[in-house]
Amino acid sequence: MTAHLNPDAQAILDVIRATGVPPLHTLTVDEARARMRAALVTRGEQLALPSVEDISVSTPGRALRLRLYRPTEGKLPVALFLHGGGWMLNDLDTHDHMCRYLAKRSGWLFASLDYRRAPEYRYPAALEDAYVAYRWILDNAERIDCDPTRRALVGESSGGTMAASLSLMLSNVGAPMPICQVMAYPITDSFDNWPSYTERGSGYILDRDQLKWFFEGYLPEGENASNQYLHPLAASDLSSLPPTLIMTAEFDPLRDEGIAYAEKLAEAGVPVDHKHAEDQMHGFLLHSKIIGKAGELLDLVADTLGLQARNHLSEPTIKQ
């Protein structure tokens, strides 16, 4: 195992340190959101797709926004995409390039969800929105011209946590399951439960103090550490979950719990492809245009979906 961070990733950290900006967790939520948008929203010409459309999903008391990325005409497999940002930061625009790229390379219709964010809306608001959006997509497949039998969940960081939690929820309520789930460096356990919080808890793009801020903003009063929808690693039975691609990073305080979740899925008999990026830090997929290795891993997400779409009529598996 390498002990060295990828040079392109290190260059990102060097730029952040050179600017002398204060840590995110010391800012107000609005300031932190603005800074993330300034860093992540693509300026200039976007990766072209035949159609990128924002639609409104009506629900009791509110409307949800879905951004649909269509790479080609025809009835396409569909992936519900859940962005990261500690449940508090980021939005459809910060992950726009990622969704465009994944849709184009995979051939899937991507539906990126603008879910309610903390701390204005704490758990379970975001997960409720994800469940409503997933069921709406299946119920309205003809309207958005997708194949409801080929469906997936894709999540990055805290969005990966939501993908894991939503899969558990769908299984427990007997809802139609996705044919696969993809999660990149998710939070799967309660705060500060693993050695990587200390070993990789400072000096990288995500640190322990920032995670503490996220947990404090998202979790409700009196949260239960055994709640599998908050902490998927607490689930007693994962055997009904779909084939999974899970990515972890060596230089990430969430490293250990992500590895533990991959191992627990495999022990439950779930087909798992676990990719541990030994020279990467948290958030690498968002920097795929700068970090060459991260671009290869983003390709793996798209290619896994492509494989699943081709194989779903038989036994859906992820190639090892």
Image (spheres, rainbow, N blue to C red):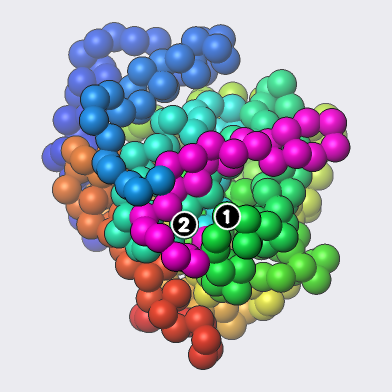
Using the numbered discs, state the Cα–Cα distance from disc 1 to disc 2 in whole angstroms: 9 Å
Whether 309 is drawn above or below 160: the answer is below
* Three-letter amino acid code at the position of disc 1: Ile
Q: Which mark is residue 144?
A: 1
Of residues 93 and 244, the one nearer the viewer is: 93
Determine the secondary structure under disc 2: strand
Residue 243 lies, in percent from the top left, at 53, 74
Q: Is residue 98 rendered to the left or right of residue 34?
A: left
Q: Amino acid at mark 2?
A: Leu
Label 1 or label 2, whichever lies nearer to me, is 1
Nearer to us in this view, 22 or 313: 313
Asked whether 262 falls inside the magenta stretch, the response is no
Tell me if label 1 and label 2 are in contact, CB under 8 Å.
yes
Q: Which residue is mark 2?
A: 109
Q: Kindly identify the residue that appears in the image at 78 percent across and 53 percent down.
A: 226
Q: Does the segment drawn in magenta span residue 74? A: yes
